[in-house]
Amino acid sequence: MRKLMLTILFILLIFTLIIAGGCSILKSKQENTEKNIMNQQKDDIQTFLNYNYNDVEKITLIDIEKTPMGYFIHGYANEDKELNFSASLTNDTFDGNISFSPKWIDKGKYDKDKTLDEIKKEQATE
């Protein structure tokens, strides 16, 4: 009877370790996917901000958030955390949907932001 109990405990321990390892691998894979998405979209976000707003020298992306509506990339500009923004991704791609902190109000170059597609078309013809 004692031998049977030890065998059952050993099997449960192995099963628990396998599940914990699998969860750890899945979490790591998700984090890598999110970092890749952030890195892939950084240039488009930088292009959008440089084209539509004054005095944007550098952006820093701090995290990515997955919601039922898609991903949101959070960051700030020019090493100023008060110049923060949240860029919305549609199908893992930045398309110009972005929200800003109030400090961005005076930085806009245009009455209405140009879309990323418009910016890329203009840059291609230059």
Image (tube, rainbow, N blue to C red):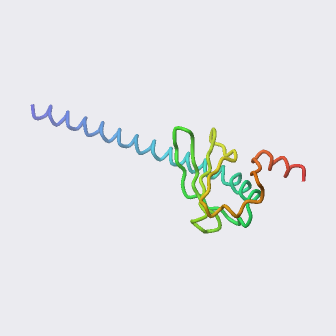
Quadrant hosting residue 61 = bottom right
At 86% from the left and 49% from the top, the residue drawn is 124
Q: Image check: 25 left or right of 94?
A: left
Q: Position of residue 73 (x, y in %)?
A: 58, 51
Quadrant hosting residue 90 = top right
Determine whether 49 is above or below 78 in the image. above
Q: Image check: 106 left or right of 6?
A: right
- Quadrant where the N terminus sits is top left
Quadrant hosting residue 78 = bottom right
At 40% from the left and 41% from the top, the residue drawn is 23
Q: Position of residue 79 (x, y in %)?
A: 61, 68
At 58% from the left and 65% from the top, the residue drawn is 82
Determine whether 87 is above or below 82 in the image. above
Q: Position of residue 21 (x, y in %)?
A: 38, 43
At 23% from the left and 38% from the top, the residue drawn is 10
Q: Image check: 105 left or right of 82?
A: right
